[in-house]
Image (cartoon, rainbow, N blue to C red):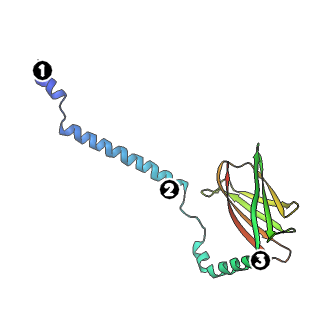
Amino acid sequence: MMTARDEAKGKLTGRHVLIMVLAFFGVMIAANVIFIRAAVTTFPGVTEDKSYLQGLNYNDTLAERAAQAELGWTAEIAEVEQSGGEGRIVVRMAKGDAALSNLALTGILKRPASDDADQALAFKALSGGLYEAEVEAFAPGAWDMTLRAENILGEAFDVEARIIAP
């Protein structure tokens, strides 16, 4: 035989529903606060410093790109190697089918989403238009390489390439 007390013990009341709703929304708000805080503190949202000034000088940027196109130079990543704590990147520079030698190449290797693992690249010339830069081993994933090649006449060629490290 069930008593009135036993019957009230298993009954769902308005107080129970209120506590469940408040607990649900409390958990949702806490999770959102955690994720929003993590997103804001890990990525500032700025992809270019001084983007306004770059916009003002956009015609200069277009003129530089046209001058680069007139040079007819091409650059391609010939090889990316990693072993142990070291690696190397080899770039092939050419004009049409002819290899370009006697160029000064500098660059930077960086992560697209952060700047804490950036590496400066100093290339040395090999034969046949190949240039090699030794780097510290880099983590798997996407990396952006920005490269500048200059000849003795001061003509410059800028390259941006995405490297996917295994």
Q: Earlier in the sequence, mark 1 or mark 3?
A: 1
Which SS class for mark 1? loop
- The residue singled out by tag 1 in the image is 2
Within the image, what quadrant is residue 124 found in? bottom right
Viewer-nearest of discs 2 and 1:
1
Viewer-nearest of discs 1 and 3:
3
Other-residue count near label 2 (Cα within 10 Å), few / some / many at <14 / 14–19 / ≥20:
few
Q: Is residue 36 left or right of residue 97?
A: left
Viewer-nearest of discs 2 and 3:
3
In whole angstroms, how far apart are the C-alphas of marks 2 and 3? 43 Å
Q: In the rendered view, would you say 143 is above or below 147?
A: above
Within the image, what quadrant is residue 10 found in? top left
Provide residue 104's location: percent of width, then percent of height. Answer: 83, 67
Q: Pick out the residue farthest to the front.
A: 97
Q: In the rendered view, would you say 69 is above or below 116?
A: below
Query: Residue drawn 27% across and 40% down?
Result: 20
Q: Earlier in the sequence, mark 2 or mark 3?
A: 2
Towards the viewer: 128 or 17: 128
Provide residue 89's location: percent of width, then percent of height. Answer: 77, 55
In whole angstroms, how far apart are the C-alphas of marks 1 and 3? 95 Å
Given contact means CB atoms under 8 Å apart, are the residues at marks 1 and 3 in contact?
Answer: no
In whole angstroms, how far apart are the C-alphas of marks 2 and 1? 57 Å
Within the image, what quadrant is residue 110 found in? bottom right
Where does the N terminus fall, quadrant-wise?
Answer: top left
Which SS class for mark 2? helix
In the rendered structure, find residue 71 and report the number of the disc placed on it: 3
- The residue singled out by tag 2 in the image is 40
Other-residue count near label 1 (Cα within 10 Å), few / some / many at <14 / 14–19 / ≥20:
few
Q: In the rendered view, would you say 34 is above or below 110?
A: above
Which SS class for mark 3? helix
Query: Residue drawn 54% across and 60% down?
Result: 44
Given contact means CB atoms under 8 Å apart, are the residues at marks 2 and 1 in contact?
Answer: no
